[in-house]
Image (cartoon, rainbow, N blue to C red):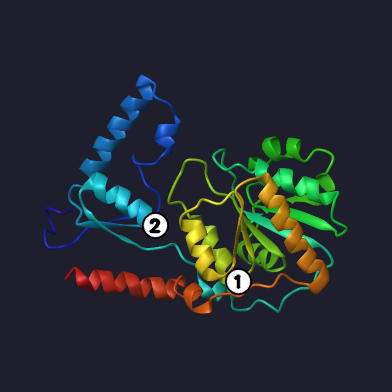
Amino acid sequence: LKKDFPNIHFIADYRDDWSTNEIFSMRGDALIFRLIKRVEQYSEKKWLSSYSSFYSVSDYYVDKLRSFLNMDGTTIENGYLSKNYSKLDGEVQGESFVITYVGTLLRSQPIEIFIGAILKIISEVDFPIQVQFLGAKNTYDKRILELVEGFEDYFTFYDRVNKTECIELQHNSDLLLLISHNSIKGTPGSKMYEYMALKKPILVCPTDGEIMEETLSQSGLGFFVNNESEAEKILIKLIQSKKTNGFIEIKANDNYIQQFDRKSIVKKLVAHLDSMG
C-alpha cells in the first residue's frame, strides 16, 4: 500500500505490544523461545517498516516501542465511553459490602493476595461481605474455587454478561478491584478507565507502582496495597466506613477523569494527526 500511496502516513495502533511484551521473557531462556522471539521481532520490524509512527496505551509502552522500532510514537489511552454511564441511577445503599472484579484473570495476576485478605476479614468484621467476579467464569474455576473453599457463599462468579448489566453490577458495588500483573509494566487495561467513569472507590491489589497507581492517585479514586497485610487493613477501614456512614468517602477529581472520556481522547488523536501534515 505504501508503494501505491507514498504520501499517506501509515500509523500503527498498539493496544498491546508484540515482540517486546514481557511475556516472552517469562517463557524462559530455552533455545526455542529465543528463536521464536527473534522471528517475532524480525516480523514486527518488517511489518512496521513502511509506517510513519505508532500509538500505544501508556508512556511506558511508547518509550519501549520507540526504542525498539526507532520510530516516533504517541500515547493514546483506551479511555471510557461516557454515554454508557449517562443513565445510571443514584447510589444504591445496599445492606452488604460488595466488591467487584471485571474481566478475565491471568496467571500473571496474583489474586491470592486479595483472596487471603478477604477471607481473614470475613470472620473478623461484623458486616456482610459479597465478592463478585464478572465475565469469563471458566478462568476462575480451578484457581479461585480452591482458595475460597468453605467460603463459597461469599463469592459469586458470573459468566460473560452484556455491557449494560456489567455496568449496573459495578455501579451497585461499594468497591471495584484491580489486580496488577507480576513483572509486566505499562499495562492499565481498559477496565481501569471504565471503573473511573463510575467514580467508585478502586482497590489496586497489589499495586503496580506505575500507571495504575499514578492515574488512580490523581483521579482521587484509588487505594493501593502491596501485600496481604496491607490489603486486610485497608479493607477493614473501607468496610467500617460503609458500616458507619453507608458509603466510602472519596473526592473524585472530575476534571482529571474527564480527560479519559473518549471524546477527549479523540480530540487528542485528531490534534496529533493534524500535526503530521
Can residue 158 be seen here?
no
Q: Position of residue 155 (x, y in %)?
A: 77, 49
Where, by quadrant of the figure, is residue 264 drawn? bottom left
**Residue in view at x 48 percent, y 74 percent:** 256
The residue closer to the viewer here, 106 or 12, is: 106
Q: Judge whether 81 appears above or below 158 on screen.
A: below
Q: Position of residue 122 (x, y in %)?
A: 82, 50
Q: Which residue is mark 2?
A: 58
**Residue in view at x 56 percent, y 52 percent:** 207
Q: Judge whether 77 appears above or below 228 on screen.
A: below
Which labelled disc corresponds to residue 199? 1
**Residue in view at x 76 percent, y 73 percent:** 92
Which labelled disc corresponds to residue 103? none
Give the mark nearest the N terminus, 1 or 2: 2
The secondary structure type at the circle numbered 1 is loop
Q: Amino acid at mark 2?
A: Ser
The residue closer to the viewer here, 65 or 118, is: 118
Q: CA distance from mark 1 to mark 2?
A: 21 Å
The 10 Å Cα crowd at callout 2, few under 14, some 14 to 19, many 20 or more, is many
